[in-house]
Image (cartoon, rainbow, N blue to C red):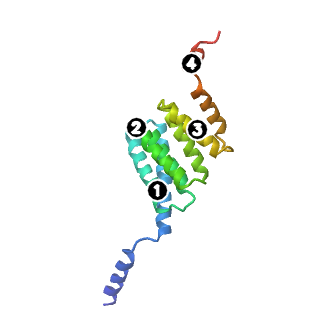
Amino acid sequence: MKNIFAAALFLVFSCQEKPKSDKKIDLSQRIDSLESKLAIEVSDEDLENETGTAMYLARDYQLFAADYAQDTNAARYLVRCAQVIQNNLNDKQRANELYLDVMNKYPKSTSAGLANFLIANNFHDQNDSLNASRYLELFMSKYPEHELIPAANDLKKYIDLPANKKKSMFEQEEKPAS
């Protein structure tokens, strides 16, 4: 009879959910593992596995940010998630949505400035100069001390150049040195 009671107690306690802190640690460790795996697959140009790993990593970043929104890593993980979606899954629109989430949910975090700059850069990559300029101006006004201000200034100057000047810049770069 004691064995049945002990077995029942064991089942009750083993079926209970893990404490939230254990789940957080497990999720953080899984993210670390997936980041390492993705880095290897990218360097090996293993595109088939890279896509799957990127999808799992993006999912786990989002799970962490949703479950632990007040954690100091939440904003940083959302930015990383957006970068994985942008670079490995080639979805700039979804990446921009996540960058905007960071800017709106964590406006005082250091990640918000990076997210703002990356939105501007995405719009520039998509040849949307109007939105790129708009987000660069927002970035420069909200984050004047950010480490990416010099890059933002250079990008803004380039965007503001007339098309013929941009073309001549590339033609000069292509000419071999004499």
Image disc number at residue 178: none
Q: Nearer the viewer, mark 4 or mark 2?
A: 4
Label 3 crowd bin: few (<14), some (14–19), many (20+), radius 10 Å: many
Residue drawn at the location 47% of the way across and 48% of the way down = 98
Under circle 2, the secondary element is: helix
Q: Amino acid at mark 2?
A: Leu
What residue did someone put label 3 on? 136
Residue 50 point in image, percent of width and height: 41, 42
What residue did someone put label 1 on? 30
Quarter-of-image position of residue 54: top left
Q: Nearer the viewer, mark 3 or mark 1?
A: 3
Which callout, 3 or 1, points at the residue further toward the start of the chain?
1
Question: For the residues marked 3 and 1, what is the alpha-carbon distance in whole angstroms?
Answer: 35 Å
What residue did someone put label 2 on? 47
Label 2 crowd bin: few (<14), some (14–19), many (20+), radius 10 Å: few
**Image height of 116 relative to 25, above or below:** above
Q: Amino acid at mark 4?
A: Phe
Question: For the residues marked 1 and 4, what is the alpha-carbon distance in whole angstroms?
Answer: 44 Å
From this viewpoint, is residue 36 visible?
no
Quarter that holds the N terminus = bottom left
Horizontal relation, residue 137 to residue 49: left or right: right
Q: Nearer the viewer, mark 2 or mark 3?
A: 3
Horizontal relation, residue 10 to residue 168: left or right: left
**Circles 4 and 3: CB distance less than 8 Å?**
no
What residue did someone put label 4 on? 170
**Image height of 140 relative to 125, above or below:** below
Which callout, 2 or 1, points at the residue further toward the start of the chain?
1
Horizontal relation, residue 157 to residue 131: left or right: right
Label total for image: 4
**Image height of 78 relative to 133, above or below:** below
